[in-house]
Amino acid sequence: MKNILVTGGAGFIGSNFIRHLLATEDHIRIINLDALTYAGNQDNLLDIQHDARYTFIHGNICDQELILFLLQKYSVDTIVHFAAETHVDRSILDPMPFVKTNIQGTAILLEAAKKIWHDKKILPTEKVCFHHISTDEVYGSLDLEDLPFTEASPHRPNSPYAASKAASNDFVRAYFRTYRIPTITTNCSNNYGPFQHPEKLIPLVITNALTGNELPIYGKGDQIRDWLYVADHCEALFKILINGIPGETYNIGGNNQTTNLEVVSTICKILDEKLPNSKFAPHHQLIRFVADRPGHDYRYAMDITKIQSQIDWTPKHSLQSGLSQTVDWYINNPDWIQKRGF
């Protein structure tokens, strides 16, 4: 029996990951610790809330006494750390919550793990793992001719959000090097899929288009991102839990690199096909270009050779298939969207 503490499990990726774990493994217990901020909601996990393998704890990762209590009470052998402030625009307006949650919160989790796993040695070192979920934004921005990011690429963050995640990555590395806490860090590209908060690009475009609101695109929409369907990400994370090497970093990308304008245009075409009688069709007429945000990275691209060769994982979803499934989910879940205030 593995006892897994998932932080931020009521959020977008975390809730999808918990659902993936419960569908894949019988001999696990999941403790979901979430502060239930604006981006986290127990509605994301209504279908599994009565599963005997699942326990929800309302709490904050900055509460070290709570973390210590949970690690001991549930004999936690694995921490999968999703909890984070993640929205770049919010970090530009107010960086301090990102410093507190992403840097201080990660450090508090690591210190609690050290006290339980290293100092008290409650569990054998070879049986424990701290898996830190991070982002490709720690690497900074690429020009069009640059090679994709590898795990050896230096940290060059350009936003307060990215800087906070880069710092958290460094804390994870330091606890492995100094205290030999078994850690793994994964840097993922832009996720999308069911249960993503509508402030992010893809769900924002879908929800706005469904109600006839404008579809805002920064600048000319020529920024390039690598899009990763959340189900593919969850499969990668699960495989890394089984086969990942302590102390290593793995890049997880979707092999779907395209401009923001192309993403929005594709969503409009999918909506036109699925809702041909919509009074807002053709939906591309809703597109509006708005002033670019400060320090907007031009291009992200991930080299996933390492995870392909060492973990035997490759994304399954094309951008077209992933977006089609995502659009279906948002069309079929209007109540969930309305509860988010959109």
Image (spheres, helix red, strand yellow):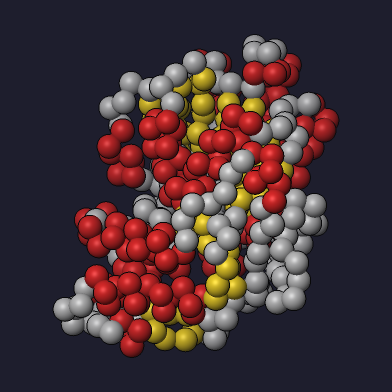
**Percent position (x, y) of residue 256?**
55, 64
Find residue 321 and report its image quarter. bottom left
Q: Position of 19 compared to 302: left or right? A: left
Picture residue at 42% right of the left edge, 37% below the top: 20
For the point 38% across and 26% down, the residue is 54
**In this view of the protein, which residue sits in the foreground, 301 or 174?**
301
Query: Quick check: 157 above or below 258?
Result: above
Residue 52 is situated, as x and y percent measured from the top left of the image, at 33, 21
Instruction: Name which quarter of the figure residue 77 lies in.
Output: top right
> Is residue 257 rendered to the left or right of residue 142?
left
Report the quarter where the C terminus lies. Answer: bottom left
- Residue at left offset 79%, top offset 26%: 179
Q: Nearer the viewer, residue 255 or 139?
A: 255
Q: Is 238 on the left-hand or right-hand side of 99? A: left
> Can the viewer see residue 278 in this picture?
yes
Q: Residue furthest right?
A: 178
